Image (cartoon, rainbow, N blue to C red):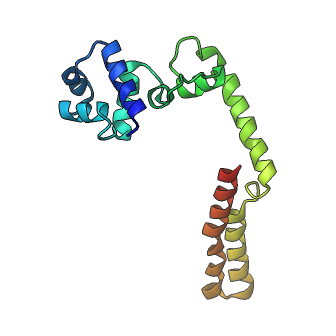
């Protein structure tokens, strides 16, 4: 674990007035675990990081990164849907996020093509027309490859 994160954990605990034992009781771990986190000997697992962020009322970014995460209104709505004052913007921001994802699909070109559906149609066509049901199943083999290519393309963007 990074020493900066460990120092941040100590600072947040003290700022909120918890002893190591109090904090351990609140999130359901041992006092020794909290001590190890604060000495950078080990790292909290994902569930404990989420519990710490909720307890301290901070985002995971603020908990893990040195500079305070400055969330735009859209990020605040997506990351913290229960935050007061953000309820009015929920629908608008969700629509903008959906439009952004659609733009990415058009750029890749591949994500818009429904290959698995086409494969099912081809399976039945090959089976009924040619009667070779024993070979028609081979049309399903490329689906995982197609899915992997689409995911890799999206991740790269």
Residue 80 on image: x %, y %: 52, 23
- In the image, 13 versus 109, the foreground residue is 13
Left or right, residue 141 beside residue 109: left
Lateral position of residue 33 relative to residue 13, left or right: left
Picture coordinates of residue 75 (x, y %)?
61, 26
Where is residue 20? Give x, y as percent: 22, 23
Q: In which quarter of the image is residue 19?
A: top left
Residue at x 32% of width, y 19% of height:
13
In the image, 125: left or right of 47? right
Quarter assignment of residue 32: top left
Q: Measured from the top left, where is residue 102 in percent x and y?
A: 75, 43
Residue 94 horizontal side relative to residue 106, left or right? left
Of residues 133 and 99, the one drawn nearer to the viewer in this rendering = 99
Quarter of the N terminus within the rendering: top left
- In this view, the residue in front, 13 or 142, is 13
Q: Which of 126 and 25 is in front in this view?
A: 25
Number of numbered discs? 0
User: Residue at left 73%, top 87%?
Assistant: 130
State the residue at coordinates (21%, 20%): 22
**In which quadrant of the rendered view does residue 103 lie?**
top right
Residue 68 in the image: above or below residue 157:
above
């Amino acid at each position: 674990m990074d020493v900066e994160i460990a120092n941040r954990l100590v600072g947040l605990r003290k700022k909120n007035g918890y002893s190591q034992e109090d904090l351990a009781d609140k999130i359901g771990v041992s006092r020794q675990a909290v001590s190890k986190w604060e000495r950078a000997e080990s790292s909290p697992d994902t569930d404990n990081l989420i519990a710490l962020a909720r307890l301290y009322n901070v985002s995971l970014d603020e908990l893990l990164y040195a500079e305070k995460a400055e969330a735009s209104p859209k990020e605040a709505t997506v990351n913290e849907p229960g935050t007061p004052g953000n309820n009015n913007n929920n629908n608008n921001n969700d629509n903008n996020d959906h439009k952004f994802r659609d733009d990415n699909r058009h750029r890749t070109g591949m994500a818009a093509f429904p290959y698995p559906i086409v494969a099912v149609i081809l399976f039945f066509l090959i089976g009924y027309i040619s009667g070779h049901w024993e070979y028609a199943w081979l049309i399903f083999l490329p689906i995982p490859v197609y899915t992997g290519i689409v995911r890799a393309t999206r991740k790269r963007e």
